[in-house]
Image (spheres, helix red, strand yellow):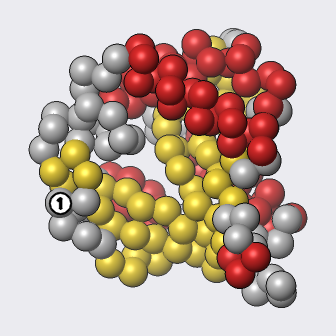
Amino acid sequence: MSQLIRVAAEHFSQYRAGFHALLSDAIASGASLGFLANFSQREADEYFEQVQDGLNSASHCLWLVLEQGQVVASIQLVLCLKANGLNRAEIQKLMVLRSARRQGLAAQLMAAVEAHAHSIKRGLLYLDTEAGSAAELFYQQQGYQCIGGLPDYACGPDGQYRANAIYYKTLSRAKP
């Protein structure tokens, strides 16, 4: 049985090893998450420090799915803190362990993010993903609209540049 949790800043360290294993698995499966296949422990540590800083400053929200205490999925919501952008937030790094895919965990995480975003009056969510990836169909099924993309946007883990696709979803019209 899976357990969905929102990770508080002070508890991040207890999930860090599992989060690292999840990230490694996603990169090994070809996911373009900002790292190349041979990413180092130093690069991972720097990334985890950025996540920790975001949680500490409340600019990031992190959810994990645990199965028998193991991290099997995660998602992040990064809040725009600019006065003119308090209606928007970016969904980042939706990851599901390869052995846990096709069980509805990604949809469960998206629902949690959207519910939280709505509760804090974030009416516009956006994300980017690799163009042509299976993730595109998933986001479309979740009600996200593609507004285009950029060629050669980022390298995949294999070092080859790939296009991205940019998606958004309007939850509500929050007022400033």
Q: How many marks?
A: 1
**Residue 22: image x %, image y %?**
49, 24
The quadrant in which the C terminus is found is bottom right
- Determine whether the residue tagged by mark 1 lies in a helix, strand or loop: loop
Horizontal and vertical percent position of residue 3: 75, 28
Identify the amino acid type marked 1.
Asp
Query: Quadrant of residue 10 in the image?
Result: top right
Quadrant for the N terminus in the image? top right
- Residue 151 is situated, as x and y percent measured from the top left of the image, at 18, 67
Residue 102 appearing in the image: yes
Q: Nearer the viewer, residue 154 or 25?
A: 154
Left or right: 62 in relation to 140? right
Which residue lies most toward the left here?
Answer: 160
Which residue is depicted at the point 69% across and 59% down? Answer: 79
What residue is drawn where x is 61% and y is 69%?
125
Would you place residue 159 above or below residue 28 in this image? below
Residue 171 visible in the displayed image? no
Residue at image location 42% in from the left, 61% down from the top: 128
Identify which residue is drawn at 80% across, 22% down.
11
User: Mark 1, residues whose alpha carbon is within 10 Å: few (<14), some, or many (≥20)?
Assistant: few
The location of residue 92, given as percent across then percent down, is 53, 50
Q: Is residue 142 above or below residue 6?
A: below
Q: Is residue 99 above or below residue 8?
A: above
From the viewer's side, name the closer residue of 21 and 42: 42
Which residue in the structure is indicated by mark 1?
A: 152
